[in-house]
Amino acid sequence: MDRGEWFCAEGAVEELCQAGDFGRALSVMEPFVAAGWRAALYAKAEILLRAGRRTEEALDLLRPEDSGWVSTTECRDLAEVLGKAGRIDEAIELLVPHLDKSWLLSVLVDITDGQGRDERVLELIAPLVDRAREARGEVHRDYAFSDAQELQARVLERAGRADEAIRILGQDIAGRRFLAQNTLIAYAELLARHGRLDELRELGGGQDAHTVLDIYAGALRSHGRVEEAEAVMRDAIAADDWVGYRAWLSSMLLAEGRLEDAIVVAEPGFGWYDCSNLLAPLVHPLLDRPEELLYLVEHPRVVPHHGHEEFQHWWRAWALAGLGRVDEAITVAGLDRPWTDPRIVKADLLKRAGRLDEAADELRALGTIKAREELCEILVLQGRADEAIAVHPTVAEQRAAEPKPKPVPLGDNGYSLEPPF
């Protein structure tokens, strides 16, 4: 197998499956299966399941040849397919011997969601939760099961025992018997989902404010208390002008349709070295709203610091292309820069403007390895899966196109003549 079209093939397979053409989807995946790629075996099994009535064939693909030994990857893949086939008890029993691998614990929780096996899962999680609590007090902490507490709370919640989940996890948070920040976030989000705003406010006002205050403000907003949410974050900024508070508040104001206010809140950070922490959260929600995006990037307050100017140029080009102003976009994108191929950039902007045929023509005319990779993506978007796979460069072609390392000249003594910096 010497073709490198895996990602393109994945996109083509999804297109074919959505169209109900499972036979062609299988034929696209077959060369990868023949090459022995584990990911391809799993993808083929999923196609068979989506096609219906081919469960055993799908499972046979993933069963290990040596039934006495199963790797964690094989275990995960087979358990997930068993779960999708509705054979939950088999999936659980397959995972049980491997739960000392913490990442398989989340697989267990995922595949049993809504399957009536919550009590069994809680029984399996309990000793791992105890290990996580005990690890907090150890000098050399074992972080292997740092997510066990939040997974236990998740299963309790979905089993209709949210109060119990809040009580147990809350005791661990109060006693600082947890290992990872994610556990604290999970507790705050649990409180928010169940309207426990007083407890969440208290949590957000303590030592973990940087981690959870935005969750409290978000809960206020979701309950229709937008002005209170804004006040909470403005007070926090006044007391502690932390970038995270400004980023959250500016994003909320943008979501409320207050673009000008969002810019004013974020603007003081645009002069900081890593201004992208404040600018990017405003840009990303506007990528599909080109008129507002253009207003943002052309706003006089938005002056990226140091090396961030190219991002502003590219965002502006993206906005212009979205408005159909492709010629302006191409000019703004800075096509004279040595690290960009202007034709690749032009094709990308044409794609952004919805002019897929023109973008494809540009890439076909260019014909480079990179152009063919980009063309593959456009053809997939057009639903032309077979053409996409055919045009994608082979692995051999991709390797041949990689830049060769520059030879280092050596002196008579065998040492490099080039300076070390």
Image (cartoon, helix red, strand yellow):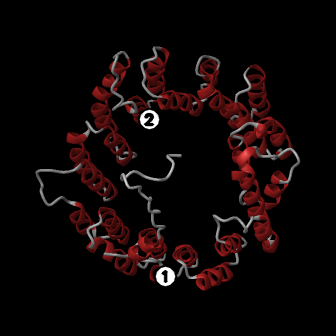
Residue 202, quarter of picture: top right
Q: Which residue is mark 2?
A: 154
Residue 383, quarter of picture: bottom right
**What amino acid type should be assigned to the residue bearing mark 1?**
Val
Classify mark 2: helix, strand or loop: helix
Q: Quadrant of the N terminus?
A: bottom left
| Separation of marks 2 and 1 at Cα, in angstroms | 45 Å
**Rendering coords of residue 154 (x, y %):** 44, 35
Please identify, in this view, whether the residue under mark 2 or under mark 1 is nearer the observer.
Answer: 1
Vertical placement of residue 318 versus 79, above or below: below
Q: Which residue is mark 1?
A: 391
Residue under the point 59% across and 20% down? 203
Residue under the point 21% across and 47% down? 94
The tally of labels here is 2
**Rendering coords of residue 326 (x, y %):** 78, 73
**Rendering coords of residue 305 (x, y %):** 76, 43
Q: Residues within 10 Å of mark 1 (few under 14, many from 20)?
A: many
Residue under the point 36% across and 72% down? 51
Vertical placement of residue 195 versus 202, above or below: below
Between 162 and 346, the one nearer to me in the picture: 346
Between 58 and 383, the one nearer to me in the picture: 383
**What amino acid type should be assigned to the residue bearing mark 2?**
Arg
Residue under the point 20% across and 60% down? 63
Between 385 and 117, the one nearer to me in the picture: 385
Between 157 and 311, the one nearer to me in the picture: 311
**Mark 2 touching mark 1, by CB under 8 A?**
no
Residue 298, quarter of picture: bottom right
Classify mark 1: helix, strand or loop: helix
